[in-house]
Image (cartoon, rainbow, N blue to C red):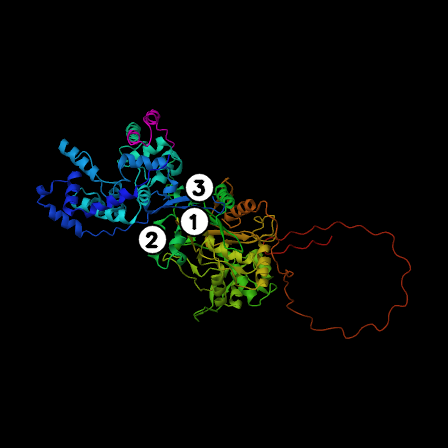
Amino acid sequence: MAAKRSDPTRRKIGHGIQLLGASVLAGALVAGLGIPAVGAIGLSAKAVANEFNTIPNDLAIPNLAQSSTIYDADGGVIAKVYAQGQNRTSVPLSKIAPVMQNALIDIEDHRYYQHGAIDLEGTLRALTKNASAGATTQGGSTLTQQYVKNVFIYEAGDNPSKLAEATRQTTGRKIQELRYAIKLEEELSKQQILDDYLNITYFGEGAYGIEAAAELYFSVHASQLTLTQAAMLAGLEQSPSEYDPTVNPIQARERRNTVLDSMATYGTITQAQAAKAEATPLDLKVTWPRTGCITAQQDEGFFCTYVEDVILQDPAFGKTASARQALWNQGGLQIHTTLDPLDQAAETKAVSDNVRADNKAAASTTMVQPGTGKILAMAQSKPYGNGPNETEINYNANADYNGGEGFQTGSVFKAVTAATALQEGIPLSYSIDAPAAADYPMMTDCSGTVHPAVSGDMNDTSTAPGYINMVQAMAASVNTYFVPLEAKAGLCNVVHMAQSLGLSYAGSTHGLVPLAQVQSLTLGVNALTPLQVANAYATFADNGVYCNAIALTSVLTNSGKSLPVPAAGCHRVMRQSTAAGVNTLLASVVSDEGTGATVGIRWSDAGKTGTTNEDDQAWFAGYTKQISDATVMSNPDNPNKSLDPWITIDGVYYPNAFGYLTSGPIWKQAMTESMRGMPDIRLDFAPRPGNAYRPPTSYPTSYPTSYPTSNPTSYPTSFPTSFPTYGGGNGGTGGTGWTGGTGGNNG
């Protein structure tokens, strides 16, 4: 069914209406629309005409707000986000079924293509009918005038006073609508006006515009609407609530049939077609719109809000906050992201398999791709939402991105200190005699402030580790090794290394603050997020190349224009040999000798456990060549409350909530699933030094003064053929902790 088209000659005649006397025009308008007679309110036709001529006619056509769609890396929909709360997807007239166009015209303004901004015939008809009835029973507004009214309503938004002004039934408002309508008819074609009308109109149940309405009520696009579907939607325009088919199906069907009768009356369809269509049910196929990040599946709501915050925060989307907010409010964006649905599923399942949502402790975990900075997954044990055991705070991100304050990292930060030491030329073989407890040595921070020596550095065991090198110290996470190593490498150098790894700021109750430059920096006293840590560790996996964490791959406007997205900006921040050294160190952690021995996976991997004082936070961060992942367990409502004792989801009891017992299993399960099917690409490692040994503390003070001057001249010519037997000695006891085993005694 072809859409009706305008007659250019008739349209010129329609435009000629404005050449009539303004008093005739305005007088006909107020009479035909049932506005109280001008005489009754003390106005003359001349006064009305004067008012008409003074009204501005430069109506600004709004750029309609539309819903934006956020996609994962495979093109799946994460969520639809409705700008200004309006479910709208604008489409050109070419993508709106002709039968829909005709249905609307026939019921609302069947002479649309024959008149200009005002339909004198329709106005006089309304005048006659209203006069006969003694009341207003029929209006005379054209589609163009109705469109102007809809523009006023759209611009009023949620402002009650502006909305009341836009819908007031007064002479002034009707005249204003006409003044703008005349100008629109001069500047836009009938097709353009009809297109704008169909995209701005409200069709009920939150559906703005014909595309959203077609999808909601019939689960089809506007281009696919049938005769009966189009007739029902055209009937909604007059009163979306009264004729709502999901609430009032009888009234909706009656109204639909009225539209079908009009279409038959004006020759768009035959009487037979109308009769057949009127006999059919509404046949709704409702798809209720799922709006906002709360509708995201697989715990993707947190990533969804992160994407929104990136657009609102990053200068790539506008130089000012107001410009970025305007872009977001306008909507119509097609936002393609880095989120990998398989990695997200693996991360989400690993979290839910290990921590219940009602647990006081909450797990949060993020995956990043080394070499690109792409955020692959982001999950939490407390689901996204505002119900019981839910949260809308993204624990994986900082406060700028709807996140929290972060969490102290504990020994996870030792990798930064190690990288600094290696970059400063201190070798993996660097060895010291590490005590059980010691003073924090004097250090100087980047401002030149000298921090004097102070007591307090200790390990979690009273046994002294003894003489060890950097690899041994990392494997066993020895505090009394890494604090003096930090002093030797330089506190300010450690700070600079952290900054180069994206760890410039930490969270606090006052928002983001610069890293605390204290002597215990290496022990992880700053609060960081899993996203920060995962991205920093990705640098080691990629041989010392750091990339900014990115969530977006492309953003398109409704017109198809590509917007710039934040760049990863990958660049080298340390020598390749330094990164290789860190890989060697962190590989020792997941080896049989390390604190993460139970966490390692079958691919070439490296990682670090981290547990803060009193076991308040427990971390595991690690990586392969392809994926870096950081996981933390903490009580987000009370980060200073110990996680002890730790009881697994299966009821297994542990007195201490160490990183390898809490976050470690989540990391291992998620990484194993995500790495499934990927090749085992070996990380670059530096040669590992042999274990350190304690140099002798004393040497002999005297030596022999004489030696034999001759050798024996004869030797025995036979030897014993049997020997006596002895009892076997015991094998000795194995070592525990830092102590070596005792040797076996002689038998």
Residues under labels 3 and 2: Cα distance? 27 Å
Relative side of 707 to 96, left or right: right
Residues under labels 2 and 1: Cα distance? 16 Å
* Magenta residue span: 261-285
What residue would you read off at disc 1? 335
Relative side of 342 to 287, left or right: right
x and y, in percent, of residue 589 in the image? 57, 54
* Within-10-Å neighbours for mark 3: few <14, some 14–19, many 20+: few
x and y, in percent, of residue 265 in the image? 28, 30
Q: Nearer the viewer, residue 290 or 45?
A: 45
Q: Earlier in the sequence, mark 3 or mark 2?
A: 3
Helix, strand or loop at label 2? It is: helix
x and y, in percent, of residue 92 in the image? 37, 44
Q: Amino acid at mark 1?
A: Ile
User: What is the quadrant of the N terminus in the image?
Assistant: top left
Q: Amino acid at mark 2?
A: Ala
Q: Earlier in the sequence, mark 1 or mark 3?
A: 3
Quadrant in the rendering for residue 389: top left
Q: Nearer the viewer, residue 697 or 456?
A: 456
Number of numbered labels in the structure image = 3
| 268 is higher (above) or lower (below) than 596 | above
What residue would you read off at disc 3? 297
What residue would you read off at disc 2? 326
